[in-house]
């Protein structure tokens, strides 16, 4: 990499102001993981040509990678003002709208990209994902099939998606397609998609022996090339609380800072603990808007831990950035953020947003573990789900983190998934009372919530409240024996 950058330095001296050389530097720095230097290089390229589409596009992508999602959205919107037919910019803008829970804008801009480039695989892939997120499952299935006909590269992932989307009577035919894709020589790195598709089909068909076989095989395949650094994960969790102890921050006075446009409600916990269900129930209430999963705290605090700069001094900036996410979803009196990983930041949330309410949602840890193990997660941050030892480590890390925050005086309400599905009204009333949020009977009807769902719960969470997932682990004791216990 140093040699390549040296070559670029010499090229810039020989061809000063050459845009292609400046663009190459952006790509090189991005590939090296130096996002901030790549952003500076993008600025240099745009100083040469403010309308250069590739430089504008790369700047938008880099802003998102640097944790500046709303700035990235503005950058790509500005690019499309200048270059209205830039289909790749459109699909990425659609992704960013989806990340900020602006689902209507996300689907519209992605459909626009499709109208311009209907045979571009990445456009079809993003369109299918946006359709799935918004609950248009038949259309999403059709688009995934169209994608498969265009590009075999996208076949395994499309088959995994289709396993959730097709009608029950189509499952046998889909199983044969999966077998054919494997026999045709599916690349090893993509085989996990086929096996997770078999997991979903077996689960839907209630074929327990095939389900167990496929879950074990799928996770073995995924674990081979989806590494999890348990030591680094532990160090990150610990550093967040150590910085809180060291800085001893004073609670921000909302009167002295920019007002938040809505009262924040945070739902935290382990993945697959019911956070999506609770968010969809609460956001059925009058004046309540769902934010989805805002990744702000992890990125914001993580960056300051890496640079050794004060988190406390930056809390007004964090507060202002969070207000931007709230404003993006439109007028509301309360917003609900269901990012599970925010459990790592409880004290910092209390400090930055004292008006916020935090709900720690617990679920029988054995059901949590099973649900993590049977689902496929694209996000590298979820790589701990592919192996029992990894799951055990994250569970222990979670429990230690909660215990430490409790000892440090963090304020939050603890609630339970099992209570939520078995006694929904009583449980919701205790939660709404804590949040100073009026109880609304519509909260008992999350299936009528039409908002987009970006998680693996996109089909399950559109159902009525039920207890089908309570104690599921009892049927599969052989899958995670160390977690399930004797």
Image: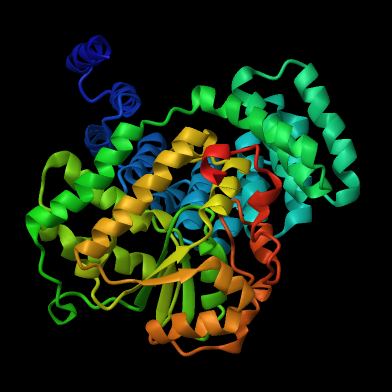
Any part of residue 119 in sight: no
Residue 292 image offset from top left, x and y in percent: 48, 62
Residue 130 image offset from top left, x and y in percent: 62, 53
Residue 32 located left or right of residue 217 = left
From what the image shows, is residue 104 above or below residue 455? below
Any part of residue 308 in sight: yes
Name the residue nearer the viewer: 482 or 340. Answer: 482
**What colouring method underlies this structural image?**
rainbow
The residue at the far front in this view is 486
The image quadrant where one finds the C terminus is: top right
Kindly identify the residue that appears in the image at 78 percent across and 35 percent down.
210
Q: Specify the quadrant of the image occupied by residue 358.
A: bottom left
Kindly identify the residue that appears in the image at 29 percent across and 34 percent down.
232
From what the image shows, is residue 209 above or below residue 110? above
The image quadrant where one finds the N terminus is: top left
Residue 409 image offset from top left, x and y in percent: 21, 68
Name the residue nearer the viewer: 87 or 429. Answer: 429
From what the image shows, is residue 119 above or below residue 291? above
Q: Specify the quadrant of the image occupied by residue 318.
A: bottom left
Kindly identify the residue that appears in the image at 44 percent across and 75 percent down.
330
Residue 229 located left or right of residue 308 = right
From what the image shows, is residue 227 above or below residue 197? above
Q: Specify the quadrant of the image occupied by residue 320.
A: bottom left
Residue 22 image offset from top left, x and y in percent: 28, 26
Residue 386 located left or right of residue 247 = right
Q: How many marks?
A: 0
Name the residue nearer the viewer: 105 or 128. Answer: 128
């Amino acid at each position: 990499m140093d040699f390549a950058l040296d070559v670029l330095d010499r090229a810039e001296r020989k061809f000063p102001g050459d845009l292609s050389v400046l663009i190459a530097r952006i790509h090189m720095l991005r590939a090296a993981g130096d996002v901030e230097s790549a952003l500076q290089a993008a600025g240099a390229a745009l100083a040469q040509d403010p309308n250069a589409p590739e430089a504008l596009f790369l700047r938008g992508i880099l802003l998102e990678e640097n944790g500046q999602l709303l700035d990235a959205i503005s950058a790509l919107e500005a690019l499309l003002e200048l270059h209205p037919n830039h289909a790749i910019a459109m699909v990425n803008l659609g992704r960013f709208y989806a990340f900020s829970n602006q689902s209507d804008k996300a689907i519209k801009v992605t459909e626009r990209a499709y109208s311009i480039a209907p045979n571009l695989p990445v456009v079809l892939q993003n369109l299918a994902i946006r359709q799935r997120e918004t609950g248009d499952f038949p259309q999403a299935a059709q688009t995934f099939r169209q994608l498969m006909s265009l590009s075999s590269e996208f076949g395994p992932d499309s088959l995994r998606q289709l396993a959730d989307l097709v009608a029950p009577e189509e499952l046998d035919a889909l199983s044969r397609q999966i077998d054919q894709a494997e026999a045709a020589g599916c690349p090893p790195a993509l085989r996990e998609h086929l096996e997770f598709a078999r997991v979903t089909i077996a689960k839907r068909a209630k074929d327990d022996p095939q389900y167990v076989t496929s879950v074990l095989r799928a996770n073995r395949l995924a674990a081979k090339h989806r590494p999890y650094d348990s030591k680094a994960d532990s160090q990150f969790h610990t550093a967040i609380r150590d910085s809180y102890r060291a800085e001893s921050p004073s609670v921000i006075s909302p009167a002295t800072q920019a007002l938040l446009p809505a009262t924040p409600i945070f739902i935290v916990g382990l993945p697959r603990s019911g956070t999506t269900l609770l968010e969809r129930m609460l956001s059925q209430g009058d004046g309540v808007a769902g934010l989805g999963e805002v990744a702000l705290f992890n990125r914001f605090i993580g960056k300051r831990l890496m640079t050794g700069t004060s988190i406390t001094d930056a809390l007004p900036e964090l507060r202002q950035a969070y207000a931007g996410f709230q404003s993006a979803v439109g007028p509301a009196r309360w917003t609900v953020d269901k990012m599970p990983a925010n459990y790592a930041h409880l004290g910092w949330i209390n400090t930055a947003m004292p008006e916020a309410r935090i709900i720690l949602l617990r679920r029988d840890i054995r059901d949590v573990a099973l649900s993590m193990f049977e689902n496929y997660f694209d996000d590298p941050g979820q790589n701990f789900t592919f192996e029992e030892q990894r799951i055990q480590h994250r569970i222990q890390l979670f429990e230690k983190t909660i215990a430490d925050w409790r000892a440090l005086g963090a304020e939050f309400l603890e609630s339970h998934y099992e209570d939520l599905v078995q006694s929904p009204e009583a449980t919701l009333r205790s939660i709404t009372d804590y949040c100073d949020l009026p109880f609304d009977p519509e909260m008992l009807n999350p299936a009528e919530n039409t908002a987009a769902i970006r998680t693996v719960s996109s089909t399950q969470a559109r159902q009525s409240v039920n207890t089908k997932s309570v104690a599921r682990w009892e049927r599969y004791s052989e899958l995670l024996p160390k977690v399930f216990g004797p």
